[in-house]
Image (tube, rainbow, N blue to C red):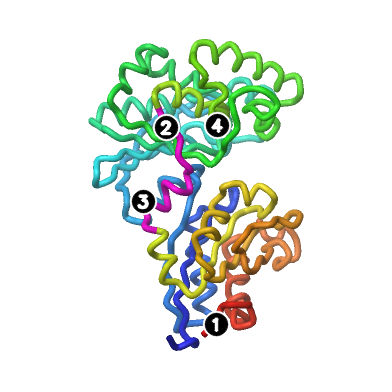
Amino acid sequence: MDRETLSVVIAPDEFGGTLSAVDAASAIADGWLSSRQADRVRLLPQSDGGPGFIAVLQAAGVATVRPLRVPGPLGDPVDATIGYGADGTVYLEAAQACGLHLLGREPDPSSARAATTAGVGTMLASAVASGARRIVVGLGGSATTDGGRGAVEELGGIGAARARMNGIDLVVASDVDNPLLGPAGAAAVFGPQKGADPVTVQDLESRLTDWAVTLGGAVASMPGAGAAGGLGAALLALGGRRRSGADVVAEATGRRRELADADVIVTGEGRYDEQTARGKVIAALAAEAGGTPVIVLAGQVRGTPDVVGVTAVRSLADFAGSVDAAMRSPREMLAGLAAEVARTVATIEGVMRE
């Protein structure tokens, strides 16, 4: 192959509330091609099931979307979308019904206590009514710690919900492996991110403990039960099976096939830190790269993450001069960083290998 022309796969995750994965991929491509016009660039935005899950599947041509009005995390109606695959699979994104971004304000103890997953129940009811035999629910980015109680009650309670989901292959797409309860559970680990102070965390833990009795069995201790504030537990109790969200997207979008033909892989996320190695999109990409150089463009870099297979890491905040500067114009800054990396790509070990 002519080493002056590279096959580049651009496969970022979302940039935490500033850029969707689809927008991030577009920005990186624009920047890269401004420096290396001859390269063959393939956009393959990614998701682990959190915010942007449906948009990523839509961009890949995997799902067509239809609008649906559902209750938001505080009960006010919000606009959501449901994805319909050609194979009959229905895709739901929990964050579209109960995401932190839907609060309209900074989370606090009152919102942490009040936030509900009722809108996810509305989505599930719509999917069932459409005749779906397989439903994939992407989890992540929620404002809730209700254990999925709102969703279950929207479906008529635990007995009615189980009856409605009977015979449906319910897939819980999440890369969070936390249990429902305890020091590694939904309230203790994720509650503070959702506005819960220590007293509220204890209150939420107590509520979840009571709710776990209703869900029954060993659901509370299952890996992933604590995802999306315990929504994972409710879905598992309805007969769901957990799969890595990153793997679900990889399979649906043909990611492994695309990576096999790449000379270089460019990915990214909002924060590259110790959590990145724990099953997130970047770790999955790097593991699948098979020695192909993987370049990470991250909003911020925290610590010294050890992600096997990552070749180089660049910080958007460093490029922009500060976190604030990067967040003021994230698309332009990301395109600029991608252009700079593309200009110097020949210096990155392994990219120009024979």
Give 282 or 93, whichever is nearer the viewer.
282
Please report contact status of discs 3 and 4: CB closer than 8 Å, yes or no: no
Give the residues in magenta: 240-254
- The residue that label 3 is drawn on is 252
In magenta stretch: residue 34: no
The residue under label 3 is which amino acid type?
Ala
The image quarter in which residue 204 lies? top right
Say which amino acid is labelled 4. Answer: Pro
Horizontal and vertical percent for residue 165? 33, 23
In percent of the image, x 53 and y 41: which residue is there?
175
Q: Is residue 147 left or right of residue 69?
A: right
Residue tagged by mark 2?
Answer: 241
The answer to which of marks 2 and 1 sits earlier in the sequence is 2
Give the spatial CA distance, label 3 vs label 4: 23 Å
Front of the two marks 3 and 1: 1
Q: Which residue is mark 4?
A: 223
- Majority SS type along the magenta span: helix
Residue 51 visible in the picture: yes
Marks 2/3: CA–CA distance: 17 Å
Quadrant containing the N terminus is: bottom left
- Few, some or many C-alpha atoms within 10 Å of disc 3 (few <14, some 14-19, many ≥20)? some
Q: Secondary structure at mark 3?
A: helix
Q: Earlier in the sequence, mark 2 or mark 3?
A: 2
**Rendering coords of residue 144 (x, y %):** 57, 27
Do tag 4 and tag 1 residues touch (Cβ < 8 Å)?
no
